[in-house]
Amino acid sequence: MGLFDFMKVCLFSEVNGVVTLQGKPVAGARIVRTAKLGDKPYTDTTTTDSRGMFNFKARFTNSVNKIAPVEPRIPQKLVIEHAGKEHVGWEMSKHNYDTDGELGKPINISCELTNEETKQEIGYKIIWGKCKVN
């Protein structure tokens, strides 16, 4: 255990997803994941494989906010870049610092690029974008 582990916060839990276009896997799509804590953005990228699949490991940082009496609010976004277009796959605000705190379970999503960006309600959480929770 590190000296500052008590301040460790999960900005974005692990994400496993698949990107399709008209039901067929999209290889080589660039996925940009961003989480924001205060004014600081945390961004990383990956690319879909030949089966259209992608993975991001959980993203952590240390923050005094974990021990401060403030309500957590971490805006999150996944953008899919394919064929010169950007598609919002996932957009929500996370209101805790827990691993798997977005859904209470691991994030597994399917992203069909022909879908309209829509609102998906899971419990009291609202997710915006083209990706659907599996």
Image (tube, rainbow, N blue to C red):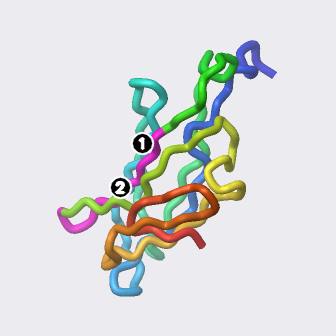
Q: Quadrant of residue 63?
A: top right
The image quadrant where one finds the N terminus is top right
Residue visible at 49% across and 67% down in the picture: 120
Q: Which residue is mark 2?
A: 79
Q: Quadrant of residue 15?
A: bottom right
Residue visible at 65% across and 35% down in the picture: 97
Residue type of the residue flagged with mark 2:
Val
**Which sits in the foreground, 16 or 131?**
131
Residue 55 horizontal side relative to residue 48, left or right: right
- Which label's residue is closer to the chain start, 2 or 1? 1
Picture coordinates of residue 5, whole percent (x, y): 73, 22
Residue visible at 41% across and 25% down in the picture: 40
Labels 2 & 1 near each other (Cβ < 8 A) = yes
Magenta-highlighted residues: 75-84
Above/below status of 46 relative to 131: above
Q: Quadrant of residue 41?
A: top left
Dominant secondary structure of the residues highlighted in magenta in the image? strand
Q: Which mark is residue 34?
A: 1
